Amino acid sequence: MVAPPMVDDPPTPRSGPAPAPVAVVTGAGGGIGSAVARRLHADGFQVACVDREGARARAGSAGLPRSAPFTCDVAVAAEVARLRDAVTGRLGTPSLLVNAAGVFFTHRVPELEEGDYDRILDVNLKGTFLTCRAFLPAMTAAGHGCIINIASTAGLRGGRDRAAYCASKAGVVMLTRSLALDHGREGVRINCVCPGLIDTPMADWITSRPDDLERWRAAVPAQRIGTPDDVAGTVSFLASADAAYVQGAVLLVDGGVSA
Ligand SMILES: NC(=O)c1ccc[n+]([C@@H]2O[C@H](COP(=O)([O-])OP(=O)(O)OC[C@H]3O[C@@H](n4cnc5c(N)ncnc54)[C@H](O)[C@@H]3O)[C@@H](O)[C@H]2O)c1
C-alpha cells in the first residue's frame, strides 16, 4: 500500500516552464491601480485586475495578455471570498496582493452623513482587511508572499476637510504594521506606500483649480505633482527580491512634502 503524501512533501514537478507568479491589484481601473497593474505585468506577473466596476476592471487589464479582469466590491466580504476563488481558479494562487482600491471626497464631520462615513471606512480600511484576510492564508501556507497596501500621507498627519479619509488611511497604516508583526515569521512581507498628491481622478479636487495647484506645486521639494508611475515603481520595488528585508515599512512617495 502506498502511503499518502505528507503535507510538506514538495509539489510534484510539472513539465514545461513554471507559470508566472500571480498578483492581485484592487482598484485596477483607477489611476494608481492601473499603473501598478501595468508595471507588475512588465515585471513578469500574471495580474488579476480587480475593480468594483466591470468596465474599469476590463480597462485595467486591457493590453496586458497575462492578466484578467475581475469585478468585486472589496467592501463586501462575500464578494471578496468569491474573488479569491475566481482568481485562484483562473490564474493560480496569488503570491502578491496590492490594495489600491479607495474612495475620497472632501467633507466636514458635522455635515458628513453616516452612510458616507461608512463608505470611506468600508472601502479604504475594511476592504483592505477583507482582501488581506482572503489572500493571506494561502501565502502563509506557501511560506512566502507579499502584500502592499496603498495608504496615504493623509494617514500620517491630519488634513483639513478630510477627517474620515485620514482616519481610514491611518487605519491602513496600522493594519499593515500589525499584520507584518503577525505574519512576517510565516514568510509574508507586508508593507504600505503612502503617496502624497498623485495626478489621478481622485486628485480632481485640486487639479481642477490651477491657481491652488500651482501654489501647492511651488511648495513641494520635488516641484511637481506625483504620477501614478511614481507609485507603481515603488510597488515594484517592494514586491521584488531587492526589498527582501523590508517588512512593516511605511514608504512615503510624496515628493518630499512630509520631509
Ligand atoms: N491620487 C492621490 O492623490 C492619492 C494620494 C494618496 C493615496 N491615494 C490612494 O491611492 C489609491 C488609488 O487611488 P487613485 O488615485 O488611483 O484613485 P482613482 O479614483 O483613480 O482609483 C480608485 C479605483 O478604486 C476603485 N474602487 C472604489 N471603490 C471600490 C470598491 N469598493 N471595490 C473595488 N474597487 C473600488 C474605483 O472604481 C477606481 O477604479 C486609493 O486608495 C487612494 O486613497 C491616492
Image (tube, rainbow, N blue to C red):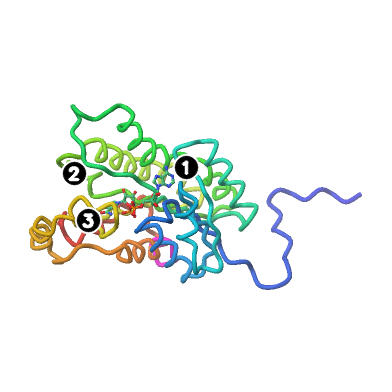
On screen, residue 250 versus residue 44, left or right, reads left
Q: Nearer the viewer, mark 3 or mark 1?
A: 1
Q: Which residue is mark 1?
A: 73
Q: Which residue is mark 2?
A: 157
Which residue lies at the image location 70% right of the left edge and 73% below the top edge? Answer: 16
**Magenta segment, principal secondary structure?**
helix
Q: Residues within 10 Å of mark 1 (few under 14, many from 20)?
A: many
Is disc 3's CB within 8 Å of ligand 1? Answer: yes
Is disc 1's CB within 8 Å of ligand 1? Answer: yes
Instruction: Name the residue nearer the viewer: 242 or 208.
Output: 208
On screen, residue 125 versus residue 199, left or right, reads right
Q: Which residues are magenta?
A: 238-243
| Residue 136 point in image, percent of width and height | 52, 46
Measured Cα–Cα span from mark 1 to mark 2: 28 Å
| Residue 245 point in image, percent of width and height | 39, 59
N-term mark: 3 or 1: 1
Q: Which residue is mark 3?
A: 197
